[in-house]
Image (spheres, rainbow, N blue to C red):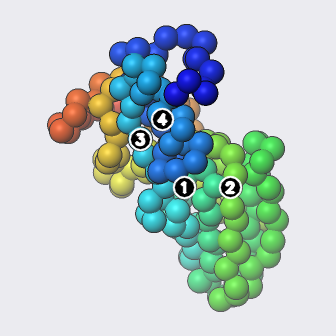
């Protein structure tokens, strides 16, 4: 460890999450934090984390309405309708490219990779202005999209103190602190109606 430059502040006793820690710089970073006295939790991208999400255009709607992918992941856009549709992504982050393509009935899927983290990236159909969807690009592998009943599950989050961001397309964002204890389930609840 003597080859590594010392950290600018003490991390002794803190819990540090290092992503990409299976090899290379991620592994080296985890070793530096451990040598400095941090409790190190490591994770790496799993096959599940690299899978593309799919948004289908069906019944003149984008289905599902919201998807989430890990930063660097892709979304495949398909058209199951018997009419022409359009996929128009409107990112704010510079690393995420804008896409504006037409998709014929049963045409070839359009796959879009999102390089930068971004919440609620809008997707529209220029042919049918009522059609919209959202893509959330997470900077960590720990994210979820709620089910129709509002429930969600994030598995594998190491013990520690975190802030969970709940994002709604019309009601904004609520950030809530949560403490995760090892080997236990934790429940967190929010209600956007009580803002």
Q: Locate residue 112: give its quadrant.
A: bottom right
Residue wearing tag 1: 69
Residue wearing tag 2: 114
> Cβ–Cβ below 8 Å for labels 3 and 4?
yes
Tell me which numbered mark, 2 or 4, is placed earlier along the sequence: 4
Res. 30 mark = 4
Q: CA distance from mark 2 to mark 3?
A: 23 Å
Res. 42 mark = 3
Q: Locate residue 189: give its quadrant.
A: top left
Give the residue at x 77% y 48%: 95
Q: Nearer the viewer, residue 129 or 190?
A: 190
Q: Secondary structure at mark 4?
A: helix
> Cβ–Cβ below 8 Å for labels 2 and 4?
no
Q: CA distance from mark 1 to mark 4?
A: 24 Å
> Cβ–Cβ below 8 Å for labels 1 and 2?
yes
**Horizontal side, residue 122 vs residue 101: left or right:** left
């Amino acid at each position: 460890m003597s080859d590594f430059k010392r950290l600018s502040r003490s991390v002794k006793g803190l819990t540090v999450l290092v992503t990409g820690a299976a090899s290379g710089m991620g592994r080296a970073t985890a070793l530096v934090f451990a040598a400095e006295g941090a409790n190190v939790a490591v994770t790496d991208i799993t096959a599940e984390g690299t899978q593309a999400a799919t948004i289908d255009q069906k019944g003149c709607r984008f289905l599902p309405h919201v998807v989430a992918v890990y930063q660097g992941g892709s979304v495949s856009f398909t058209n199951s309708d018997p009419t022409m549709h359009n996929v128009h992504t409107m990112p704010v982050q510079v690393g995420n490219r804008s896409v504006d393509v037409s998709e014929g009935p049963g045409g070839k899927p359009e796959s879009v990779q999102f390089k930068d983290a971004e919440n609620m990236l809008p997707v529209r159909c220029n042919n049918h202005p009522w059609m919209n969807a959202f893509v959330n690009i997470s900077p960590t592998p720990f994210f979820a999209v709620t089910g129709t009943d509002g429930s969600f599950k994030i598995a594998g989050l190491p013990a520690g103190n975190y802030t969970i961001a709940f994002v709604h397309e019309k009601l904004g964002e609520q950030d809530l602190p949560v403490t995760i204890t090892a080997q236990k389930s934790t429940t967190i609840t929010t209600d956007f109606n009580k803002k």
